[in-house]
Each structure stands twice: as structure tokens, then as C-alpha cells.
Image: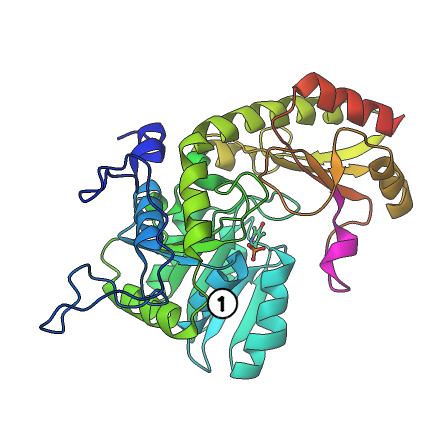
């Protein structure tokens, strides 16, 4: 089935007992046992599993062509669960320009539990190959990356990881399953901050991991971590995500069409130094993105000519865009990225990150035009 059809039907099977067409929200934390002590519904206690969460997890697995999905209370909780599958003494390779929360999680928390990490530029597979160590157990990708929109070759890096006995995980938040399907390209696990495009309305915090077919040991391990660490997604948030899913393909397509127009406008603007958008033929990762993605996405960043203060001044003048972090919602956001990333940020000071929303492209272009005046 095509992804538009899956988005409408996955996780929304009509309920046998009520005939309700729309999924019910089951808030109960506990489920009755039969006289013989068994659990007829399969559910015992909502940290372990919950009917509404089970629907959302089933939908996610179908969307990403995985065998099993796990829903967490945030994207960070999902990444933390994946890293907890590793042991003290293991080594992980990550992109040097990845989401700053993951960089800090690894450096500040997991390093104290004996995990070692190397951060590399993943635009060339060779750079990743050179970072492999005998104890490398996970190669983590984020493509397009945050906020520079660098593109990494998922198929080749997954092959490299497998040749050295490591898993390959991909943070697919920015592309969304509409434009990129890492499991089909050879990755073992996909991660989403469902706070972003999957939620799509800037009102749910969530995360997910989806595991490739045939990786039963990884599924067992993640199930154990999800159930015992307990950073599970609440039934209501799962219900909101199920409600957002049918419109995901429409939203992402419309947002991407706007982003393409905005990128072209910024690219020819005299006050703009460079635009980072994989849909532009001048972008270093354009050909690779065209090969492994079905669309270029609705995130872009650009560097204003001048200093960080000049960039801040542009952001200060917007009227349609909102100055805020996060992405993937209906409303367009603009953000001076370096100032939220912390002292070790590799992001240029004059860079502004843009999440393109569902407004009319002409209004978005006019707003940035007046802000750049
Ligand atoms: C937002 C984000 C995260 C973290 O997700 P939370 O839901 O905020 O915990 C991780 N990776 C990427 C690429 C993100 O954009």
C-alpha cells in the first residue's frame, strides 16, 4: 500500500466490541484478569502496554516498514533507550553536527556509564570508516542533519556498520517517513521525535524507535528497556498522534512545496551568504538526497551576510514567522540556532534555522523580504 493509504488506515482498524470507526482513548492503567489468572486482552498494566499506545506503535511500524515500534515520552527518551541497548566499553559513532540534545546526552550522561563516542562529519563514507573501532556497536545517523542539512549515505554507512558488527540507526525526524525510509535502505533502527512532523501541530511531545524485520534480539532488548525504564508515551498523546497521522502526507507535501520556493528566494537574495537546503542544485548533498529521499523536506537554514547580531536583527523583524525553536508544526518558525545549542555548538553564528509551515508561500517570502531589508 502507498503511504497515503497507510497514514489513513494504519492503527485505525474498527474495534470489534464497539464498532467505533475512530480509535478509542483508553486511559485505564490496569486491566482485569480472568478467573484462571490470564489476561484476555493481552494488556496487564499501562507501562507495559496500553491499547491506544499499541495502535500508535502498530501504525509507526507500518509507516516505516519495520517489524515493531516503541513509543516514548520524547525523542530524547527514544534515543536514550537505543543507547541503553549498549554496554559499558562500547563505542558509538555519531554525526558531528547532530541534534544538540543527543550530543549532550552522550557527552554528559552516557560517557559516565562507560560509553565512548566519536563525532564525525558523515558527508563522506570514508570519514565514518576511519572512525570505526573494534568495539564500535552503533553508527548513528541524522540525515538531513540539524541545522546544516548535511546528507549522509544511509545505504553505504549501514553496510559499513554491518561489516563491523555494528547496528546502524537513523534519526529520521527531519525527513519524516513521507520522504525517507531508512529501514528500506538498510538501517536497523529508525528514530523519530514525533513532537515534530508526526505530531504536526506543536502540541504533543513524543519519540519513537522502529526496528527492522529480523532483528528480534534488538526488539527484545528495547521492549525490556521501554517497560522497565518507563519513559512511555501517555495514551492521550498516542491518541493525538493517531489523529495527526492521516494528514501527515498532505502537510509534509505542502510544507515542502513552500520550503522549495523559500529556498529559491533566499538563494538569490543579496543579503544572504548561503542557503542550506538539499533541494538546491548548489547544495553539496543534492544528488545523494535526490537518490535516497523522495522529497527534500520543509527544513532549511541560511546564513545572513555579517555577524550573529545581523542574523538576530533579521529574526527580530519577522511578523508571520514566529521566533521559536522546534519544527514540523503548521506554523513557520525561525530561530538563531547557535544561541540555543550551547558552548560546543559548531553552528555558524550568522545562521538562522527555518521550519516552513502551511501558510501561503507568498506571505512567507514577503515576510522574509521585509525582514532582510
Ligand atoms: C527535536 C529533535 C530531537 C529531540 O526530540 P524531543 O522530542 O525534543 O525530545 C531529536 N532529533 C531531532 C533531529 C530533533 O529535531
- At x 77%, y 53%, the residue is 338
| Up/down of 97 relative to 175, above or below | below
Drawn side of residue 252 relative to residue 350, left or right: left
Q: Quadrant of residue 355?
A: top right
Q: Which residues are magenta?
A: 335-346
- 338 within the magenta span: yes
Q: Quadrant of residue 169?
A: bottom left
- At x 68%, y 25%, the residue is 262
Drawn side of residue 251 relative to residue 366, left or right: left
Q: Bin the neighbour count of mark 1 within 10 Å (Cα to Cα): few under 14, some 14-19, many 20 and up.
A: some
Q: Quadrant of the N terminus?
A: top left
Cβ of mark 1 under 8 Å from ligand 1: the answer is: no
Drawn side of residue 136 relative to residue 353, left or right: left
Q: Percent from the top left, x then y, of residue 330?
A: 60, 33
- 117 within the magenta span: no
Residue that mark 1 sits on: 80
- At x 49%, y 48%, the residue is 194
Q: Percent from the top left, x then y, of residue 337?
A: 74, 49
Q: How is the image coloured?
A: rainbow
| Up/down of 174 relative to 345, above or below | above
- At x 51%, y 77%, the residue is 115
- Say which element carries label 1: helix
Q: Percent from the top left, x then y, of residue 112?
A: 57, 82
Q: Nearer the viewer, residue 339 or 116?
A: 339
Q: Quadrant of residue 345?
A: bottom right
Q: Nearer the viewer, residue 41 or 272?
A: 41
Looking at the image, which residue sits at the far top? 362
Q: Nearer the viewer, residue 15 or 331?
A: 15
State whether residue 180 appears in this view: no
Q: Percent from the top left, x then y, of residue 132?
A: 47, 67
Amino acid at each position: 500500500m502507498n503511504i497515503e493509504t497507510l497514514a489513513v488506515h494504519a492503527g485505525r482498524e474498527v474495534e470489534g466490541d464497539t464498532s467505533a470507526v475512530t480509535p478509542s482513548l483508553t486511559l485505564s492503567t490496569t486491566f482485569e484478569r480472568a478467573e484462571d489468572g490470564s489476561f484476555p486482552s493481552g494488556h496487564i498494566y499501562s507501562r507495559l502496554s496500553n491499547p491506544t499506545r499499541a495502535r500508535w506503535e502498530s501504525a509507526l511500524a507500518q509507516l516505516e516498514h519495520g517489524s515493531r515500534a516503541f513509543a516514548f515520552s520524547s525523542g530524547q527518551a527514544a534515543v536514550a533507550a537505543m543507547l541503553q541497548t549498549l554496554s559499558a566499553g562500547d563505542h558509538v559513532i555519531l554525526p558531528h553536527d547532530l541534534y544538540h540534545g543527543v550530543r549532550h546526552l552522550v557527552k554528559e550522561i552516557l560517557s559516565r556509564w562507560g560509553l565512548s563516542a566519536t563525532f564525525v562529519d558523515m558527508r563522506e563514507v570514508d570519514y565514518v570508516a576511519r572512525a570505526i573501532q573494534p568495539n564500535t556497536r552503533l553508527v548513528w545517523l541524522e540525515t538531513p542533519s540539524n541545522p546544516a542539512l548535511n546528507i549522509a549515505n544511509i545505504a553505504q554507512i549501514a553496510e559499513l556498520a554491518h561489516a563491523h558488527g555494528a547496528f546502524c540507526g537513523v534519526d529520521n525526524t527531519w525527513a519524516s517517513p513521507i520522504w525517507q525510509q531508512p529501514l528500506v535502505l538498510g538501517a536497523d533502527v529508525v528514530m523519530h521525535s514525533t513532537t515534530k512532523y508526526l505530531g504536526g501541530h506543536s502540541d504533543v511531545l513524543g519519540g519513537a524507535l522502529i526496528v527492522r524485520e529480523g532483528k528480534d534480539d534488538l526488539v527484545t532488548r528495547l521492549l525490556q528497556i521501554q517497560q522497565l525504564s518507563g519513559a512511555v508515551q501517555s495514551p492521550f498523546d498516542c491518541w493525538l498522534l493517531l489523529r495527526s497521522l492521516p494528514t501527515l502526507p498532505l502537510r509534509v507535501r505542502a510544507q515542502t512545496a513552500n520550503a522549495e520556493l523559500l529556498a529559491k528566494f533566499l538563494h538569490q537574495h543579496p543579503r544572504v551568504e548561503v542557503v542550506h537546503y538539499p533541494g538546491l542544485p548548489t547544495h553539496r548533498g543534492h544528488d545523494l538526497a535526490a537518490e535516497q529521499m523522495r522529497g527534500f523536506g520543509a527544513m532549511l537554514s541560511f546564513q545572513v551576510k555579517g555577524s550573529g547580531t545581523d542574523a538576530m536583527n533579521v529574526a527580530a523583524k519577522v511578523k508571520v514567522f514566529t521566533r521559536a525553536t522546534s519544527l514540523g508544526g503548521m506554523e513557520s518558525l525561525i530561530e538563531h540556532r547557535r544561541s540555543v545549542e550551547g558552548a560546543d555548538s559548531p553552528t555558524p553564528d550568522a545562521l538562522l534555522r527555518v521550519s516552513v509551515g502551511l501558510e501561503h508561500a507568498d506571505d512567507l517570502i514577503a515576510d522574509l523580504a521585509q525582514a532582510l531589508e
